[in-house]
């Protein structure tokens, strides 16, 4: 290996012009270690400013400058990736990008990086697309669990004075991404800091660049690879770049499972013999994987530095997973705002009923008005509302919205939870008034 190649592997974010200069200046036969030592002597040391929290004691952590320390949380879902790729595929990608982001931040004078050990947790494995909730290699957690883990860690960091948190947690499931976004919102609202999953930042030029690369490698969505979001040639290329020793050679003979949209993936995933991937792993290319890793790491590092310079991370271009109107609407802001509008309508109707309490009270006390029909008319809507609200409260945890989410900053996603609680309170208030009116009516008739 040439000395310049070794240096590039150890510090891939060094300028290409500098690397070309090293190649031109390298004398034949000069020992690699001597050259690297000489080059390193004239470069700023990034490793001296990158610390690993698991290796530090209390005094060392307390000595960090909180306002100039960027904390990096690395995640990696344990998720089946078919017969050819390891279950920690996403984690290896996250760890590589996190290392490059850490190096870029540490190169900045006055800044320190605090690295956390990888968190092997994630929500909603790809096997769920076809309704297979149990699948060898997938060991995921509920959305609420993932959100709680990152909220709790971020809260501890925030309480200790840290204000900059970068999350590297590549995984495309909407529930997974939503949990991390909500944890970031909570940290910003409760601690006034910045927390962002850099995987969510995806500028248009990145999409154009990778689309060109995919076309050149026969990974275009219109071809055999199709709409591949999991363990196909696109993802196998990344592991060929990072950990080729973990890729089963059988990928070269893998049969393609091509889908054109999310509906196709659901149909493929439901098949009895589904192997755990979509697309065409045999099209994987180490060259494409190398360029993908380099491009994404470079973009994430650039945006991390921009955020440290004052960029509001919420204004950065976001990556979206949409295939057709239904999927885009279901997991997009349109669905949340529709829910919010329906909630306002429901609250208006409930409030209107609340203002008529005195009417109910008077009507129930009038002689002859207390009949089974009137009782059923007044009570049945209340009972139905209570049953519906109890159903909502019971179903929300399964969907990733437990009652404990009331501690998180307000979001339209939680309006159903608030609605259910409010409806139950109003219903019990009305039931109490009906009971009082019934007792007083009986006494008046007597």
Image: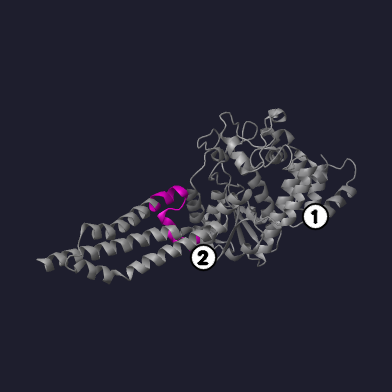
Where's the C terminus, which quadrant?
bottom left
Q: Are marks 2 and 1 in contact (CB under 8 Å)?
A: no
Q: Is residue 335 left or right of residue 352?
A: right
Mark nearer the N terminus (2 vs 1) = 1
Residue 30 magenta-drawn? no
Identify the magenta region: 392-412
Q: Residue at horizontal 83%, vertical 51%?
A: 19
Residue 33: give x, y in percent of width and height.
79, 44
**3D distance between C-alphas at marks 2 and 1:** 38 Å
Can you give x and y, in whole percent of width and height, for residue 337 in the image? 53, 61
Quadrant of the frame with the N terminus: top right
Left or right of 372? Residue 65 is: right
Front residue of 274/262: it is 262
Q: Which residue is mark 1?
A: 15
Residue at which label 2 appears = 189
The one of 408 and 329 positioned closer to us in this rendering? 329
Helix, strand or loop for the magenta stretch, by majority = helix
Q: Residue at x 70, y 61 (%)?
A: 108
Q: Nearer the viewer, mark 2 or mark 1?
A: 2
């Amino acid at each position: 290996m040439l000395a310049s190649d070794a240096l590039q592997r150890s510090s891939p974010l060094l300028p290409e012009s500098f690397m070309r200069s090293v190649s031109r200046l390298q004398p034949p036969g000069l020992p690699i270690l001597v050259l690297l030592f000489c080059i390193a002597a004239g470069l700023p040391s990034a490793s001296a400013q990158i610390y690993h929290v698991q290796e530090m004691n209390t005094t060392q952590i307390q000595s960090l400058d909180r306002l100039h320390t960027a904390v990096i949380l690395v995640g990696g879902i344990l998720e089946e990736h078919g017969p050819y790729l390891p279950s920690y595929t996403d984690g290896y990608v996250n760890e590589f990008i996190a290392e490059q982001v850490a190096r870029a931040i540490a190169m900045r004078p006055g800044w320190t990086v605090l690295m956390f050990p990888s968190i092997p947790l994630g929500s909603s494995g790809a096997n769920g697309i076809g309704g297979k909730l149990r699948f060898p290699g997938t060991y995921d957690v509920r959305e609420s669990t993932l959100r709680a883990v990152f909220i709790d860690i971020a809260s501890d960091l925030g309480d200790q004075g840290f204000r900059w948190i970068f999350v590297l947690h590549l995984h495309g499931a909407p529930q997974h991404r939503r949990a991390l976004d909500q944890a970031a919102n909570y940290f910003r609202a409760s601690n006034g800091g910045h927390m962002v999953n850099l995987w969510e930042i995806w500028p248009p030029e990145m999409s154009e660049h990778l689309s060109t690369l995919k076309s050149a490698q026969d990974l275009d969505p219109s071809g055999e690879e199709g709409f591949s979001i999991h363990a196909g040639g696109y993802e196998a290329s990344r592991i060929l770049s990072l950990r080729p020793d973990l890729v089963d050679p059988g990928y070269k003979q893998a049969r393609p499972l091509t889908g054109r949209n999310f509906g196709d993936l659901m149909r493929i995933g439901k098949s009895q013999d589904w192997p755990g991937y979509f697309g065409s792993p045999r099209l994987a290319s180490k060259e494409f994987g190398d360029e993908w890793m380099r491009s994404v790491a470079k973009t994430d590092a650039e945006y991390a530095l921009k955020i440290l310079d004052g960029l509001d991370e919420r204004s950065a271009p976001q990556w979206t997973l949409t295939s057709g109107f239904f999927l885009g609407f279901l997991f997009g802001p349109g669905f949340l705002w529709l829910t919010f509008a329906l909630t306002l309508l429901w609250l208006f109707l409930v409030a209107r009923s609340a203002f008529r309490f005195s009417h109910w009270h008077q009507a129930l006390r009038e002689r002859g008005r207390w009949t089974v029909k009137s009782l059923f008319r007044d009570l049945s809507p209340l009972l139905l509302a209570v049953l519906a609200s109890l159903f909502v409260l019971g179903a929300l945890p399964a969907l990733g919205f437990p009652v404990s989410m009331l501690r998180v900053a307000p979001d339209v996603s939680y309006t159903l939870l608030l609605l259910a609680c409010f409806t139950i309170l109003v219903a019990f208030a009305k039931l109490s008034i009906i009971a009082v009116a019934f007792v007083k009516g009986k006494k008046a008739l007597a």
